Image (cartoon, helix red, strand yellow):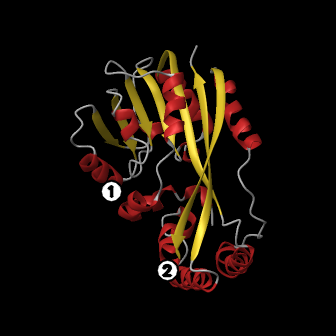
Amino acid sequence: MDLDGLGWTFDTVAGAYEKLRPGYPEELYETIFDYIPLNGSCRAVEVGIGGGQATLPVLRTGCSVTAVEYGTEFTKLCGEKFGEYPNFTVITNKFEDTVFSDESVDLVYSASAFHWIPESIGYAKVFAMLKSGGAFARFANHPYRDKGNPALSEEMDRIYGEYYYKFYCREQKPLAEYTGEQALQRAKIAEKYGFEDIRYDLFYRTRTFSASEYCALLGTYSDHIAIEERVRREFFSKIEDAINRYGGSITVYDTVDLQLARKP
């Protein structure tokens, strides 16, 4: 199965996604707002709002935010969630198909969503939309399985091999934490499309889940949602049982990367 075509899956679990997916560290927003100060005269576009995990800090600057989201359930959810903000609007459409005037936006930002857009289309469109001096902020969360419980991790590897990798007919490879080098290479992409003043940063945190909570979280990931239902239920049951047998909770180690780039 082609994992690149699974963007549609998130909208099928919009409520759970909004509840279970984390927001982003306050330090990340401080870094963005130091790079591109925002106020009531500014305009921002959010690419792929999802459950609105990254929206409120930008709205609170007074900046007007137009969110573009392909999922109809997400747009309904966020329309209600941010309905009290007169500076917020949401458009149901693919970003690449949405028309924006050239040089009309101060900030374009995207949280854990920009990888769904073809690179050449996405970066060129953002560059055209931005005013001179405007900024593009791309950030994402990269979770890594519990480092403090190797026995649980080993058992989960076995379960993933039996269910996930077997279902997708893929070779199982060792998990690896997201690195600064990966963040740097992602930041450098913007150079190809005319951006300058390119920067990146990393932020870290941990989250702890019960067995049932963790399986609910797994149910918001596109590649897990797409697994055939009978297989998915058995797969999640095995994961939940393993967590309960090895301590009853699992800690996720998050690395959040941020890339910033400016239009000359």
Q: Which residue is mark 1?
A: 73
Residue nearest the viewer, comparing 177 with 130: 177
The mark nearer the N terminus, 1 or 2, is: 1
Dot 2: element? helix
Q: Is residue 162 visible?
A: yes
Dot 1: element? helix
Identify the residue at image location x=52%, y=46%. 113
Identify the residue at image location x=40%, y=59%. 11
Q: Which amino acid type is marked by label 1?
A: Glu
Q: Which amino acid type is marked by label 2?
A: Glu
Q: Which residue is mark 2?
A: 229
- Give percent across and percent down for residue 185: 73, 37
Q: Is residue 91 left or right of residue 38?
A: left
Q: In the image, which disc is placed on residue 63? A: none
User: Splitting the image into 4 quarters, where does residue 173 fall?
Assistant: bottom right
Residue nearest the viewer, comparing 193 with 55: 55
The residue carrying pointer 2 sits among few (fewer than 14), some (14 to 19) or many (20 or more) residues within 10 Å by Cα, namely few
Q: Is residue 118 left or right of residue 108?
A: right
